[in-house]
Amino acid sequence: MLTVHAPDGVPEVTEGADLAGLLLAALGDHALRDGDVVAVTSKVVSKAEGRVSYGDRDAAVAAETARVVATRGGTRIVRTRLGLTMAAAGVDASNVEQGKVVVHPLDPDASARRLRVALHERTGANVGVVVTDTAGRAWRQGQTDIAIGAAGLAVLESYAGAVDGYGNELAVTEPAVADELASAAELAQGKLGARPFAVIRGRADLVLAPDDHGLGAVAMIRDDGTDLFGYGSREAVVRAVAAAPGDDVPFGSTASPQDLLDALRRAGIDARLEPDEGSLVCPADQKVAAAVLAFAHGWRVEPDEAPDRTDSGVDLRLRPATP
Amino acid sequence: MLTVHAPDGVPEVTEGADLAGLLLAALGDHALRDGDVVAVTSKVVSKAEGRVSYGDRDAAVAAETARVVATRGGTRIVRTRLGLTMAAAGVDASNVEQGKVVVHPLDPDASARRLRVALHERTGANVGVVVTDTAGRAWRQGQTDIAIGAAGLAVLESYAGAVDGYGNELAVTEPAVADELASAAELAQGKLGARPFAVIRGRADLVLAPDDHGLGAVAMIRDDGTDLFGYGSREAVVRAVAAAPGDDVPFGSTASPQDLLDALRRAGIDARLEPDEGSLVCPADQKVAAAVLAFAHGWRVEPDEAPDRTDSGVDLRLRPATP
């Protein structure tokens, strides 16, 4: 049996607040036990850490943004300085005084570690901690809560080497249990603000030894440049067409010659593979389209010059941008 | 308090199995109550419905695929005939006899409705049902369980019009509670196959009246063509460069003239807006790049001809593809 208890009656959290004390007071007789996982919303962690600012939401979003992923109308989805891909960089104006905005904690994994240590010191209980926030997703409507910080928790459950009842290896199965714990917490907390904590009991197997804080939620973030969905579809096209010389970070790993050849031919470009050279050759009068496709595959037109939007008379040679 | 109980001891599920009977037998003394949510893995629903086939995994993936979203190495992420974006179209070879593959139920929302009705008839309890599967995500490592079918459940919790304790409207907050319920179930079930059911108690507010099966999990799927991440970044570029005449379904809604103008200028194309015409004009020697960017923004080069990879001498006019 898994249980999720989100205590009521937590008072307003202000800068400098003692989160461990607030949780323990709200839990009352529900003492923490070894193996519990404590979820806390990033909102109150930010408030306790003073990560609240007056007024300028756009400036707060800009400060939290590493790069823009996609925009459409008023929606701006960005990759944040923490590596999270979220609308408005996770900057939030709900459950805070009107006219103020809350930004993410400076280091949510460190916030989780501090709360874990404080709870251990005061109760002796060895718990895991997740710091949660609400995030939209590609492909699906609505939002789920995810873990943006974690301590003392196996954030990804590994089944590497595990075998099911039929003898099949569970090779690629790696449940993102920290995110599932955050979602389970949200179901008990709701969104109206009075229940920023939840205690999840029943997955003690995920909680690490007291002196092992684990990899943290940062381990759940795909590296920039390796994600297949690192840019919105439209933004990816703009980036490829506008690519400057030297902008050699493509959309994931460098494609094989065959993959690029397939893409060129799909676009009607009569390319051929030069196996000895590890390069592709195509007609110069298709230079612009070839350069755009090359960029998208981690290749470039040689010599290394910008696609100049005009076509010259010699054949083009394409090579991987990072040999 | 939210509780999630995943009973042990469910026997192997085979074609024609009575899922309601199997669940009730496994629950034993844990009787279902009004307002419970029953989660069941799509794996056993498929097995009970005979959606298991021998051998040819690639053929099964092809049959479930509506279109390819992104590929990289051996990974093929597709949009399935159900509208789900999943690796290998959700075709799975785990927790099934070696040499067999399991595909999604034909209509998971209908499967959920049937189970809901059967449980109501036998127990009198009004429950919600989610049919779950394990899915990867953009941007984040690992997988979470999501709802691919649902009955009698508010799959998206609406806070439209709700106001937090500070008087802020929660305008865009819409928790995907059916997915969160699926994730909570997974935490109790694990992946090794003996616990295909879970009963979640504590969110009776999400369960609809017995004669109202709700919108189903299909309501959680973003419409194709409106999703900002409908194609992998690389695949979006290939699609835009290779676009055929008449392929007028772009990446989301038609962009504003200003958005396209910004993209053209970012690519070094000296375009200008003709406000009276609702069109953009740019030099013909930049035709290929302009056509690619126009496609990505839901516009096209006029007259409606394929980008021919060569550039002619007259100015180009760009117009929205769907006026």
Image (cartoon, coloured by chain):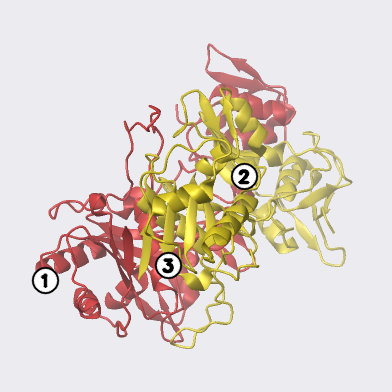
Chain colours: A yellow, B red
> Marks 1/3: CA distance?
28 Å
Q: In which quarter of the image is the C terminus of chain B?
A: top left
Q: In which quarter of the image is residue B181?
A: bottom left
Q: What element carries label 1?
A: helix
- Give the residue displayed 33% in from the left and 47% down from the top: B156
Q: Is mark 2 on a helix, strand or loop?
A: loop
The residue that disc 1 covers is: B122
Label at residue A231: 2
Q: In this view, does B300 lie above or below B23?
A: above
Q: Residue furthest right?
A: A303
Q: In which quarter of the image is residue A233?
A: top right
Foreground: disc 1 or disc 3: 3
Label at residue A215: none
Q: Is residue A321 above or below residue A47?
A: below
Q: Position of residue B58 (x, y in %)?
A: 50, 73
Please state which amino acid type lies under the numbered disc 1: Arg
Q: In this view, does A295 lie to the left or right of B61?
A: right
The residue that disc 3 covers is: B187
Q: Position of residue B249 (x, y in %)?
A: 48, 40
- Give the residue displayed 64% in from the left and 55% down from the top: A218
Nearest to N terminus: mark 1 or mark 3: 1
Q: Which chain carries label 3?
A: B
Please state which amino acid type lies under the numbered disc 3: Leu
Q: Looking at this view, is B239 or A270 the one in front? A: B239
Q: Is residue A235 above or below residue B12?
A: above
- Give the residue displayed 54% in from the left and 70% down from the top: A157
Q: What element carries label 3?
A: helix
> Badges 2 and 3: C-beta atoms under 8 Å apart?
no
Q: Position of residue B240 (x, y in %)?
A: 60, 43
Please state which amino acid type lies under the numbered disc 2: Tyr
- Give the residue displayed 51% in from the left and 39% down from the top: B250
